[in-house]
Image: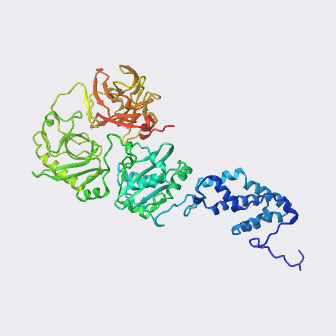
Amino acid sequence: MGLFTRPRAAIDWSTEPIVAEANWQRHQTVRPSFVALAETLIAESGRDSRRIDTDKVVGALTNICRTIAAENLPDRSDAIEAILERPGNARDAIWDYFTYAGAKGVALSNHIGELLTSEKVRIIIASMIDEGRLHSTGDVGSDGIPLMSPDSPDTEALADPGGDELDPVSTVYKLISSVGLSVMVYGPGDLSECFVATSEAAPLFSGTVTESGLLGAFPDLSNVYWFGIDGVDGSAIVVPVTPDADVGRILREVVDPLSNLGAPWSTAIARGSVVPTTFARIFDRSVVRRVWNLPGLHTLRPVDAEPLELSWSLRSRMMADEWRNISGNFFAKEVVDAQGARITVHFASWRGSHAVFVALGESIDGRVPDEMTRIELSSCEIGVAYEQVVLIERLQGRGCPSFADVGGATDRVVTQFGSLSGPVADPMPPRAADQHGEGRSAPRYDRGRNSVLELARGANCELETHRLRVELEWESGPAGATVDTSALLLADTGKVRSDIDFVFYNQPRHEVCSVRHEKYSGTAGAHDYVSLDLATATPYAHTIVIVGSLDGGTFSSLHGLRAVVNDLDSGHTIISFSITGSTSETALILGEIYQRNGGWKFRAVGQGYATGLRGVAEDFGITVD
């Protein structure tokens, strides 16, 4: 440029009219309108067009165009950027600009146009729709997940309820806090109403399965769980989204359907423990309900299931009345009887209902002493609960009792306790069971022992021999039924230390302890058993869990089912435990052998699993590939 030459004014490509050269127009065979192409891709996706933001699809197509154009015409990137930033259909002038740019521009125009209408771009846009990045409901977070429809924009961090590891509210608090996202449905109604609305909008919930009842799961959607809370201020259903979950399916089958819910229910996506303020208020005064107590899911409830969880209102009234919360729905209270003696009264679940009881002493071989079975009582009974001989009053039904029910039962138990001072060897002071169900001391009763001790479910007894064989027997069942017996050696954490602590058919010997999986041919056919030398396990294992699993079919097909414990030294059966009420279980925890006060004890369990041996192993910390 000469010294006196005027500089040419810069062109403002954001507004400059662009007219294609007439002789190049015949070369432009592909000139897609961004909006028309976006609408076509949305229609082809098969998704509800109302749930997809057309402008976001246009933006995605524009970004594809921008990237390829800038790579092919780097010296014209400023003009390309300015034109693509034009509002509305004015951005379609990019095709005329390519023509204006010359022969290379015409070739590029056709190249990009063909790419934007190609199968590759269709796949890219469909994937972005599935991931929620083009969702039209409300705002979208930086992670591309929609915010759904919270009742207000106000959020706050959930307060830690501060319970122990057995408390369900503390468990779900940790779950919400540890995952990145949680899908929430919440509102002022009760949990049954919330679940009905949720399952009608998202039918996936109607197919819920569960093991413990605390968390619901979906049979064909792994690593996805949900739970329900019920409180004074409302209820909620929460789906924590773990990092390894199928986000695409969660968006299609959970987020999208639930976004259509209307009043009184609100929906939201929480980031960690940061939740809508309304949900935080509900959570602060709530309890976790087991899913089998909800409409349509009652068939999931086991025969021996816990009764309905206490309401938050009842829990708070009991604590105000000086009941001490030991763990979950287990409470204790010190009372004074008519003679001025202090008694520890307990409130907990027992045999499918809530109950109030006083511990009389530790059971002997899991049984009530003969002299106490002859005592006539009014509404109370003497039984074995939490490894204690107890004076107990059951509150009828599976529902949540009232505060008056608890108070009345407490008064009757205390009154009856005063009449039992004679039969009890040393009744005062009664010892409360700790949260693991063990009394610190107990009176002993003189009575003879049978050669085979018949235990009830939940009962325990001391083991006087260290060399044992544990197996399952049955009277009749399908021909060729194969039952495998296995053992899990647990530390005092309630979990295995490593996978070597799982003794089963593929790993028949423990590396440290004398615990073995072996074969046996008996009257019921060939089956497995576990042999143990507890002397070798004393310094290593706190508890040994014995498990039976059925290869094909369920345990309901085996009649006269019982677990037996044999003394390997004498060859005699010393303990027998009948197992009844099985339905869909393919694995059973037969019993626990555990250390207590320098010795070993056996507890009859009989807990069923519909998820087989794999489900049991994973519950105790085994990694299953």
Q: Identify the image's colour scheme: rainbow, by chain, secondary structure or one colour.
A: rainbow
- The answer to whether residue 77 is seen in the rendering is no
- Residue nearest the observer in this picture, 348 or 252: 252
- Rendered location of residue 365, percent (x, y): 23, 33
Q: How many marks?
A: 0
- Residue nearest the observer in this picture, 549 or 479: 479
Left or right relative to 406: residue 587 = right
- Residue nearest the observer in this picture, 339 or 270: 270
Q: Is residue 537 above or below residue 388?
A: above
- The answer to whether residue 396 is seen in the rendering is yes
Q: Is residue 447 above or below residue 30?
A: above
- Rendered location of residue 275, percent (x, y): 45, 61
Left or right relative to 422: residue 221 = right
- Rendered location of residue 278, percent (x, y): 42, 64
Residue under the image location 58 percent in, 58 percent down: 144
Residue under the image location 32 percent in, 50 percent down: 309
Choose top left, top right, bottom left or bottom right for residue 141.
bottom right
Choose top left, top right, bottom left or bottom right for residue 38.
bottom right
Left or right relative to 180: residue 129 = right
Residue under the image location 77 percent in, 73 percent down: 12
- Residue nearest the observer in this picture, 311 or 332: 311
- Rendered location of residue 86, percent (x, y): 71, 69
